[in-house]
Image: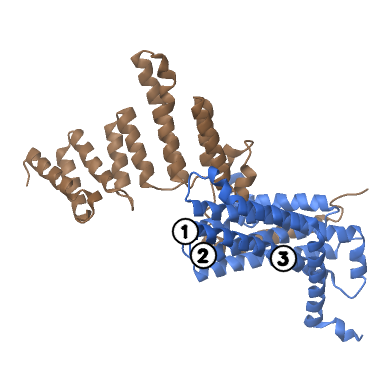
């Protein structure tokens, strides 16, 4: 193969796509993703039977709240655990060495890994959103009531997806220098917790938290409770905020990974 | 020696922090325009160490709050006042959004809990003190609701009710009903009760002015507005104050 076949954006993209595909395949073989997806789906399906715990809100709102909560909660777990597991297992088994001895740049390897995890999270969210959508549609037809227009529901689910992919990017950054999957996944979850608490940071001694992204902005439940779609400008701004932090964490991870010694 | 962070260099730490600070500064205006609803540190502090904090942060607020509410009701059935109070606090800390928790929690505090120690028929002064203490607790609970949940006519009306029925503070009750009446979506009766309380406080002219101010906003075709009752009250007050 000529040298030019390894250079240029097209070649980079091809390599990233290959690594992403491989990562997604490996992730789907893991029991973790399946376990979390089944648990999440069971909880969403079981939301109707958890009505005994619903006092404060209308039933449809409770089901939607609970479903979105399950997507966010299990999605965050999957984002941190799967990213750490998929990345660190390849480092520990030396499989990454085989890839990196080929003409693959380290940032391409990392970006491919991240794209694979994002694909996994997309499948996870899509599966649970379909389950939640069916549960809500069935209950809506039984009650003869409507929770919120479909675009609002989809926007709320999209916010959950943005949130958990950002958690995956944070975890990837930790993975770039971490020595074990356990450390990386714990640190990833801790960073996600800090980002979730970020909204509570006022001034004073908590002001330093402001350097961290605010996961509270991706509040799908609030959007659903409002009942009307978010404005295009707001969504674009939020997507920009998300993209800026995802790029930042992937870039930082690439920087750290480039200097990593094997 | 194996280390989890052997590859983490001081230069990386410095670069990470510098880039994070720079990004935060650049994104600050964008973040402010997105207006995070944020949260209340007190809510987290209340939940800390009680279980459910992680689930609440993860988004499973409704079900966690529902669990606490059930436990609060079990404590209420056992007539365990400290446990009921604590669990009511946990319920609203887990999910501050439903008014149901705030209103029913305040009613438990104001009307149920003080009756339990009074079953032994203590002297009147003690009864009065116990009722006043619990009423104060209920009012503080609702005040917290106004801070966490945001302005809601129902919270102010409940505060007005407690002032009216438990503390006997008509002045405060009138203030609460007025504040409630001025909020969007307030029930019509809040304004009527405010007028009535002004009259009871011996300020008929003020009551008349208030009802005259309220009258144009009352739709004639809505029975809940009780326009006829307000017109009658205005007539009575006009006679009492000799104004027309």
Residue B133 at x, y = what percent? Answer: 41, 25
Q: Count up the numbered dots.
A: 3
Which residue is at the front of the view, A218 or B112? Answer: B112
Q: Residue at x 73, y 64 (%)?
A: A120
Residue A30 at x, y = what percent? Answer: 81, 58
Give the answer, above or below, for where A45 lies relative to B127: below
- Label located before the other in sequence (3 or 1): 3
Mark 1 and mark 2 in contact? Answer it, CB < 8 Å.
yes
Colour assignment, chain B: brown
Q: Residue at x 62, y 36 (%)?
A: B50
Residue B189 falls in image quadrant: top left
Residue A247 falls in image quadrant: bottom right
Residue under label 2: A152
Q: Is residue A48 visible?
A: yes
3 or 2: mark nearer the eye = 2
Marks 1/2 same chain: yes
Chain depicted in blue: A
Q: How is the image coloured?
A: by chain
Q: Residue at x 64, y 45 (%)?
A: B54
Q: Is residue A110 visible?
A: no
Residue A206 at x, y = what percent? Answer: 61, 47
- Label located before the other in sequence (3 or 2): 3
Residue under label 1: A226
Give the answer, above or below, for where B9 lies relative to B240: below
Residue under label 3: A118
Chain ID of residue with mark 2? A
Q: How far is mark 3 from mark 2, CA to CA?
A: 23 Å
């Amino acid at each position: 193969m000529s040298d030019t076949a390894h250079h240029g954006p097209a070649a980079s993209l091809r390599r990233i796509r290959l690594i992403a595909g491989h990562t997604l395949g490996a992730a789907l073989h893991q029991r973790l993703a399946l376990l979390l997806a089944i648990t999440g789906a069971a909880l969403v399906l079981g939301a109707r039977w958890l009505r005994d715990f619903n006092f404060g809100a209308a039933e449809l709102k409770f089901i939607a709240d609970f479903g979105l909560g399950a997507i966010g909660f299990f999605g965050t777990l999957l984002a941190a655990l799967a990213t750490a597991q998929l990345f660190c297992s390849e480092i520990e088994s030396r499989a990454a060495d085989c890839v990196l001895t080929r003409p693959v740049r380290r940032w391409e390897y990392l970006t491919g890994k991240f794209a694979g995890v994002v694909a996994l999270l997309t499948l996870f969210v899509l599966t649970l959103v379909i389950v939640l959508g069916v549960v809500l549609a069935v209950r809506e037809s039984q009650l003869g009531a409507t929770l919120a227009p479909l675009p609002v529901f989809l926007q709320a689910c999209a916010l959950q997806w943005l949130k958990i992919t950002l958690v995956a990017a944070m975890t990837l950054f930790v993975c770039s220098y971490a020595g074990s999957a356990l450390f990386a996944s714990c640190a990833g979850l801790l960073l996600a917790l800090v980002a979730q608490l970020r909204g509570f940071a006022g001034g004073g001694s908590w002001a330093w938290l402001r350097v961290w992204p605010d996961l509270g902005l991706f509040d799908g439940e609030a959007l659903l409770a409002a009942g009307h779609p978010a404005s295009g400008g707001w969504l674009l701004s939020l997507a920009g905020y998300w993209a800026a932090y995802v790029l930042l964490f992937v870039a930082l991870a690439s920087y750290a990974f480039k200097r990593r010694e094997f | 020696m194996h280390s989890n962070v052997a590859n983490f260099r001081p230069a990386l730490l410095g670069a990470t922090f510098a880039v994070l600070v720079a990004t935060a500064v650049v994104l600050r205006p964008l973040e402010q325009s997105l207006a995070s609803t944020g949260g209340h540190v007190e809510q987290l502090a209340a939940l800390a160490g009680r279980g459910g904090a992680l689930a609440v942060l993860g988004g499973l607020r409704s079900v966690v709050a529902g669990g606490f509410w059930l436990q609060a009701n079990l404590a209420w059935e056992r007539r365990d006042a400290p446990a009921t109070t604590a669990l009511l606090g946990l319920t609203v800390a887990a999910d501050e959004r439903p008014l149901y928790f705030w209103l029913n929690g305040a009613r438990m505090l104001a009307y149920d809990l003080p009756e339990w120690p009074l079953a032994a028929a203590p002297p009147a002064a003690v009864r009065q003190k116990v009722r006043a203490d619990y009423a104060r607790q209920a009012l503080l609970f609702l005040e917290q609701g106004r801070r966490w949940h945001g302005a809601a006519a129902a919270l102010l009306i409940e505060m007005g009710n407690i002032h009216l029925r438990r503390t006997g503070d008509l002045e405060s009750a009138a203030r609460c009903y007025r504040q409630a009446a001025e909020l969007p979506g307030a029930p019509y009766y809040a304004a009527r009760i405010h007028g009535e309380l002004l009259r009871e406080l011996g300020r008929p002219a003020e009551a008349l002015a208030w009802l005259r101010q309220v009258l144009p906003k009352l739709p004639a075709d809505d029975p809940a507005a009780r326009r006829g009752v307000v017109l009658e009250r205005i007539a009575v007050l006009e006679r009492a104050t000799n104004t027309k």
